[in-house]
Amino acid sequence: MTEQTDISSFEDDGSGEADADSDPDPESEPGENPYLSDPDTEFEPVAALDAEAAREQAALLREAVRYHDHRYYVRADPEIGDRAYDALFSRLRELEDAFDLDTDGSPTGRVGGEPVEEFETVEHVAPMRSIDSSGEEAEVREFADRVERAVGEQAFVCEPKFDGVSVEVVYEDGKYERAVTRGDGTEGDDVTRNVRTIASVPERLRGDHPDFLAVRGEVFMPRDAFNAYNRERVERGEEPFANPRNATAGTIRQQDPAVVAERPMDCFFFEALAGADFDTQWERHATLPEWGLQVNDEVERVADIDGAIAYRNAMLDRRDDLDYEIDGVVVKVDDRDACEELGATARAPRWAFAYKFPARTEETTVRDIAVQVGRTGRLTPVALLDPVEVGGVTVSRASLHNPDQIRDLDVNVGDRVSVQRAGDVIPYVDAVVEKDSEGHFAFPDRCPVCDSAVEHDGPLAFCTGGLACDAQLQRAVEHYASRDALDIEGLGEKSVGQLMEAGLLTGLPDLYTLDRDAVAELEGWGETSADKLVAAVEASREPDLADFLVAIGVPEVGPTVARDLARAFGTFEAVRAASREELESVDGIGEVVANEIREFFDSERNEAVIAGLLDHVSPRETEVETGDALAGLTFVFTGSLPGMTRGDAQELVERHGANATSSVSGNTDYLVAGENPGASKTADAEENDVPVLDGAGFRELLADRGVETDGENGG
């Protein structure tokens, strides 16, 4: 099912009209609703219907969508294919839009809603307690001994311990009322609109349900869907989620329900918090699906703790075969009267215990291989892994470096690999330890984002699409606007994506011709935000030369090299025209960097982009004279200096013989700390006894050394 819809009730009274509030038997015959078995999806034009006919057809379609949702999510026995289902859903939405039909409780409500500014805090109907846990068998047996001493020998119900986000979901008169995160166990965030978009959370209960029901569920992102979603993010050049739980937690707290609706979320229900009494845990497990609530089919009832331990060991062996992450199993006393007698502590029930799995080793399975398109067009293969702990950090992706590395490792999807972290930071695949695939991953000869041809330069591969490639363009714009470049506020990942999707941004020069009114109409913007963005772009028309060199993405040219180039050549035209030999004459620039710079400016594709930018941008000339008033001193800058950018300050001290570095050490003479300084640099200065200057102190030092600051640079 590709649309996000609801699992609710279906009943047909024989008249052909549906009762949306009725509670059908899911095993009953479909009756006269034509959209249940082998539906005809060739619909007559909407214009041919009158309002009454549209209402009747919409009612039947709503029933049908709910019926098929129940078959798909709860019974795992779909009756129609995805294409037919999508046609029914689309027709329903078309009718509701065309005839302005009331959509309260309709499956189409699953596609999202208006964004919220912040989540309200809501008190739970009943406490959502934690569970005592251990990875040691002895402690699990001790739990069973405590139970037996208190209430006698007991049977247990064993469930997978899902690694997702717990929510309380409340139904009143069978209708979905609200959803709240676990929070501190007493109250949590109101995520009603976000959870409503999850297809396996029913909008209405089925069968003989209670008038009021509060249930506990675990929202999660299925592993296959997580890998596919991460693959898309990697290919777009975006940072992937670390693991399915992080993806779930980040999604469920999105302020825009439409974003949640687009992500592949699911939910298992496993506890009735209020409104329903059961004699046993097993009865609860069997009853929730009768009300339309999805439960996990791996739950088992065992006679004793030996059976529970065997269940845990079996699930440990099977965990990699499941389409969801689990980090152990939960063992619950089956008899509910015994549970009541056992009671609970302030934080956990005494009738349940979590038997945890051991941490994963540095060996794991490659679930997918994605090819990431970087800002310069370089294609980097990335292995998407079952999460594994490496050096105390959970890793779910690792670099494969380049096509040659893939061939050398002979690695492919499905292989078991060892993972290391380079310099304790960047994870990479070290070796294939168990070959479970045929051959190695076939590196693409077309860009996965724009379908342009791929060119190889030694071991490296590049997309030839340039800024016609959305991945390169998005990253290029984000880089152009970043703090180290032109520092254009308001151009982050999300906003750049919106501008591109709306067709307002097809190249870097388009930043300077943005239609303010069109920007204001984008979702989440408005006139004030649009004015701020346009003003920020306008303020970048006369950038510092070094900042501009960084912004256009010259390879190997970061802030330090850019300042060296600016001081050496003075103007952008001089830098652009410099020969390899002239570039190599600049301190700190060797043959490799000089070649990269020269090839960048010789590229016809880059020349076209630069020419377009220079129609709007005039980089400021840099003074090339240098002095020695600050010779021998080393400065580090942090925070915002009044009237002076950090780049200006660094360029100023370097022009007078000092060094400007990015990190504090024992060799640092001064840390210049403006507003909102970095805590780590301040702490490092204290540890190394480095004097800290504020903006006024910095200017006083310059004045004492005979260094003048002009108005442009904030003196």
Image (cartoon, rainbow, N blue to C red):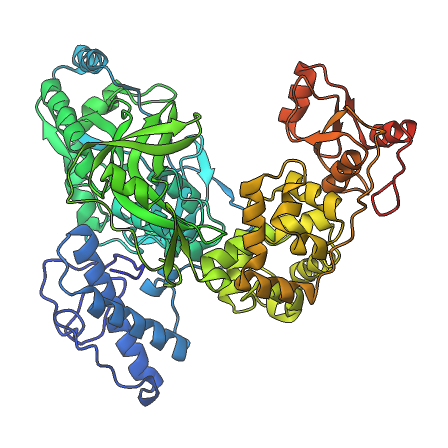
Task: Quarter of the image for the N terminus: give it.
Answer: bottom left
| Depth check, front residue: 424 or 187 | 424
Residue at the spot 16% in from the left edge and 57% down from the top edge: 71
Establish if 349 lies above or below 179: above
Image position, residue 45 (x, y; %): 30, 86
Task: Quarter of the image for the C terminus: give it.
Answer: top right
Left or right: residue 419 versus residue 507 is left
Establish if 42 lies above or below 557: below
Residue 124 visible, this angle: yes
Quadrant in the rendering for residue 286: top left
Residue at the spot 34% in from the left edge and 40% down from the top edge: 400
Image position, residue 560 (x, y; %): 66, 38
Left or right: residue 134 versus residue 713 is left
Q: Residue furthest bottom?
A: 48
Image position, residue 175 (x, y; %): 33, 54
Q: Residue furthest front?
A: 581
Residue 115 visible, this angle: no
Establish if 364 lies above or below 29: above
Left or right: residue 590 versus residue 540 is left
Residue at the spot 89% in from the left edge and 29% down from the top edge: 700
Quadrant in the rendering for residue 29: bottom left
